[in-house]
Amino acid sequence: MRIGILTGGGDCPGLNAAIRAVVKRGTSEHGCSIVGFRNGWQGVIDGDARPLTRDDVSGILVVGGTMLGTARCHPHKVEGGMEAVQETVVNEKLDGLICIGGDGTLKAAGKVSEATGIPVIGIPKTIDNDVVGTDAAIGFDTAVSIATEAIDRLHSTAESHNRVMVVELMGRHSGWIAVTAGMAGGADIILAPEEPFDIEVIVKKIKHRHRYKNFSIVAVAEGAVPAEGSNWTGSPTIDERGNPIAGSIGHEVTKAIELMTGFPTRLTVLGYVQRGGIPTASDRLLGTRFGIAAIDAIVAGESGKYTALQGEDIVLKDFSVMMGKTKWVPKELLEAAWGL
Amino acid sequence: MRIGILTGGGDCPGLNAAIRAVVKRGTSEHGCSIVGFRNGWQGVIDGDARPLTRDDVSGILVVGGTMLGTARCHPHKVEGGMEAVQETVVNEKLDGLICIGGDGTLKAAGKVSEATGIPVIGIPKTIDNDVVGTDAAIGFDTAVSIATEAIDRLHSTAESHNRVMVVELMGRHSGWIAVTAGMAGGADIILAPEEPFDIEVIVKKIKHRHRYKNFSIVAVAEGAVPAEGSNWTGSPTIDERGNPIAGSIGHEVTKAIELMTGFPTRLTVLGYVQRGGIPTASDRLLGTRFGIAAIDAIVAGESGKYTALQGEDIVLKDFSVMMGKTKWVPKELLEAAWGL
Amino acid sequence: MRIGILTGGGDCPGLNAAIRAVVKRGTSEHGCSIVGFRNGWQGVIDGDARPLTRDDVSGILVVGGTMLGTARCHPHKVEGGMEAVQETVVNEKLDGLICIGGDGTLKAAGKVSEATGIPVIGIPKTIDNDVVGTDAAIGFDTAVSIATEAIDRLHSTAESHNRVMVVELMGRHSGWIAVTAGMAGGADIILAPEEPFDIEVIVKKIKHRHRYKNFSIVAVAEGAVPAEGSNWTGSPTIDERGNPIAGSIGHEVTKAIELMTGFPTRLTVLGYVQRGGIPTASDRLLGTRFGIAAIDAIVAGESGKYTALQGEDIVLKDFSVMMGKTKWVPKELLEAAWGL
Amino acid sequence: MRIGILTGGGDCPGLNAAIRAVVKRGTSEHGCSIVGFRNGWQGVIDGDARPLTRDDVSGILVVGGTMLGTARCHPHKVEGGMEAVQETVVNEKLDGLICIGGDGTLKAAGKVSEATGIPVIGIPKTIDNDVVGTDAAIGFDTAVSIATEAIDRLHSTAESHNRVMVVELMGRHSGWIAVTAGMAGGADIILAPEEPFDIEVIVKKIKHRHRYKNFSIVAVAEGAVPAEGSNWTGSPTIDERGNPIAGSIGHEVTKAIELMTGFPTRLTVLGYVQRGGIPTASDRLLGTRFGIAAIDAIVAGESGKYTALQGEDIVLKDFSVMMGKTKWVPKELLEAAWGL
């Protein structure tokens, strides 16, 4: 069998582990040929492919990002996209396609499968961890690990200078990184999109805390929003490229806290470092297991499913389970984060 | 309510996160007084206790080991042990006891509860990850992270010198660390207690690999055993203190590979560094969530149960679920480890 | 002898190693009493002091920041400041004062010594590494290590997405962090205050590089400036609190590169994480050696000198050697950075 | 000009930075062709060479070990070795040779230069840091960083279990790693070859310490030796492959301390992990600067010299400065290590 593989959407650590596992398992156990497409769906449209051998994936387990490159491209949104994909499927004699990506990439996979009849298997990745149906997606553990280390570092400066330190973390729709890294790093206040915040409650909490402590750490997801009806609303904006800029929610919260408490307050926007670098052991293992499960599934004739971690097991789920949905941080975690 | 807390068995990273959560949640949300016992059950026997305040647990989230100290002591195996524990329970006016530990510590907790009527809640910790009923125990993720980094380091030397590098990892009964870190670190051969090995198969595999590659990495759990009936059996021994010594299985495997392949083969015994140092974000979060669940449970009147991670949730399980059992590495993982 | 100790200016990793060494060596070898002042010179003015014992400094070697707290306060610039310092010196019966800090803190130390006659010894710290007369100051190695790891992470994303990644690093007056971390991290362009840059030269270099590579990394010191007479000058500004803001040089450079090359270009402002967290082994050793040398010097009757690293040796130098001067990145390094 | 490059002796992190710098600087600034020899002098003898381009060295800055491979081979000790080298020099039309290695590799370089007339420049590398004439050699900073992190980890376990933890570190002739990492990690006792130890003094010190503390950390260089005339002498042995074995000095010291103090005492032999993995920023910078200086030197017609770090500068020194000598840990550092 000839199996194609691509990575779509934002890059993250652990993608290479999945690619490596697909290639090694696919060639050695199943006798498949594996074909890698460059820059996500763009590469399928352009027919930009190359065979992947065991040698090609040697040493990439520890390397962040994706050896295949990635792009935010959806064939069904590009004129002539589906036809071009169809042509590549035929030209490359593909018997199946493994798509590593988030919601968008997998949605495209579903449409491609419908239109062309090619079997597709998805592998979920997103540092945001908001894919429904799996305990974890590739990249999340590393992002949390980086964010936690950053919070650890900010503790030093906060304590030494009697300051409030605000750190803005990734997470536009859900607050997984902010809540998880915030708890692991001992943040005193954690703001997530799941629970709109009242700046006055936060200010009150900080003031109370500073009666006996002289510093506070505030972790803010970039998608956190002020509660409707609260007196203060800020003016959160993210620039068109998603860059950390003045006017981000972290910036607004920083200004408000400094103004309303009188304590010196400083902002750190962690940004792209959260999605780069050496994957944690956990992400490498998850990527590897997902890769194995994906190639096994496609060889077994499955299609329209994605690999998922369920407790200690890797299982397959229908695309419909996750499509168009967001996995929110559960109440229990939000309360725990707030309660400590 | 007055709640006691202790840590028993071997130390590991993440214990302090659990202690901190119990103290913070217990005092702030439930109005409890928390009493810490030094050196596990020994401290309960000796009445060696001290009140724990929020201030006492400030800053310990990032600190490895346990601020309470630990010891391998079981009151029911010590003469007069149960009576001494009973006396302490009365003297300290305890309404409940949170026991952080492995199989032995929780077994003792069950017996103490039976004998004295005091409610007990367990929190599972073990870098070996072999506690039944929970996806993870405190300390495992950090141990795997350290072991993986070590394997990463050995890769450099192996490749530069055309060598076989053997690394002996912790795991006397189960091979979780060896299998997980071995896969995450890209080890070529992984030996776990779950699957007795045939040295000749290993030698053959290494010889085959060295036709096109000039190095190999072998990860060996300290409890790995040769298959019965294989021509070679080694003579694995661990000294009475559990120290890395000549004669360990890693040592035997190293000698055998060098002898039977002719390739220079070197051993690294990772040892105690696997159980020390800064906990990973994941272990801090797990410790924190377990601590919260444990104090909530004891306040809610539960007893004889332990906290467990199940997918994304923290649940309570009866001691009987885990007592006297070992969670083995599942077949799927063993095969995956071998297949790549 | 009774010796006071304080930390002034910005905090950084390695300060606690110096405090620990002063206390341990001072009490055990010289029989001194050590008195710690809180929040730099502010604590001396306020008489906010506490005795420091070996127990107080136990375990702080690995902790970032300063256990004494710090503040940007200069007694000679505060009304009544020098008189208050004089009073504290008498009240605390001080025989000497060890001042850990940068240019400002040591300048104040000189003035205090002149005015009160108390012997003072300085220990240079600054993540900026711009203290004249010493190969290194406390905090620099850790800052470079953090910045380099961040650049490593950005590489993943840059390569995966065909992007230019700009990272703004600390260094208002000199470019030590940007040049050193830039070279260690393999940045393609490095901008330092020592060498005003021409944006058109940079753009040309990036365009040339992107003929055969599809990503670039640009490391910018926050104090980098456009060359006079270059067509583009940007509008670099830093807010009054020194916070990363839109309008910083990194922001301007990012906008200019994107506009002039057409390549997607992203900014990361690393900020405060550069000065926090666990010190590197090198900074711990430097802090320890400086601490030992400082207490030995003051006991030996020295004054008006600071500890300095010279090759493998720790030596003493007169305050005059460093006062009012800046150690620039040498030409050789700047050229090396540019030439690769 | 055609310039050859090789890496000899034990591998270590930072070698690739030097290779990369030679290739990038050599090709871009000087228009040289660079030829890499595989496995040190063995590759020169065998004529096992390949051209190195900028592309070949892309991405290797963060990779430990050496992309060229290494071997302990000296052409003047191999029959026909010098003739074979001469032949390769002629065949490859080499105008110069850059040799990265320790004492042995550079000695061979000197002999090759004498015999063949080819100009040679050396770059010193050794994790042991015992090269005379340079403040640092490639690999040392990373080794210290790894060893320090290991000591940090052992602290957790030592404190939690009331133990003495002994850690055996690399350093057969000099104690740089043990002394430096020992001080940075806060070891209580540090044993280096430079200063033969009296086990009774050590035992006394530990006993004294355990009156008020319940743990100790002992860092032992593998080449540490008992003082002549002390009652106990141990029986230090290292196996023919240099492996950590029972009978090593660490093992002997561990047994003696446990026996003579009665405190539970555990050994960790850190081994090969000290020479592997991602180089620190400092080692990458040193490797890069050495590489630049080496290619510049050979292009400028220098020979028989090695690159050296002197304060902030890179300078050239005659082979005679370092040949046959060992840079010992200075008295000041040994005393400082002992005094804290």
Image (spheres, coloured by chain):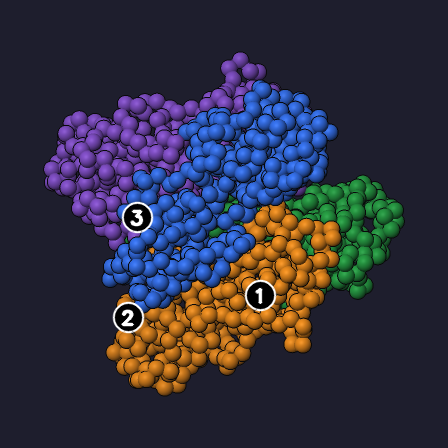
Chain colours: A purple, B blue, C green, D orange
B199 horizontally vs D237: left or right: left
Q: Amino acid at mark 3?
A: Trp
Marks 3 and 2: which is nearer the front?
3
Parent chain of label 2: D
**Residue at mark 2:** D49
Secondary structure of the residue carrying numbered label 2: strand
Q: Can see residue D71? A: yes
Q: Residues within 10 Å of mark 1 (few under 14, many from 20)?
A: some
Q: Nearer the viewer, residue B38 or A63?
A: B38
Q: Amino acid at mark 1?
A: Glu
Q: Which mark is residue D252?
A: 1
Q: Can see residue C173? A: no
Mark 3 → mark 2, Cα distance in angstroms: 35 Å
Mark 1 → mark 2, Cα distance in angstroms: 45 Å
Q: Are marks 3 and 2 on the same chain?
A: no
In percent of width and height, residue C164 lies at: 37, 45
Image quadrant occupied by the N terminus of chain D:
bottom left
Parent chain of label 3: B
Return the residue found at the far bottom. Answer: D115
Q: Which mark is residue B140?
A: none
Tags 3 and 2 touching, CB below 8 Å: no
Kindly indicate the quadrant of the structure image that contains residue A320. top left
In percent of width and height, residue A294 lies at: 26, 37
Q: Which mark is residue B338?
A: 3
Return the residue found at the far top. Answer: A229
Q: Is C14 located above or below residue B40 in the figure?
A: below
Kindly indicate the quadrant of the structure image that contains residue B233. bottom left
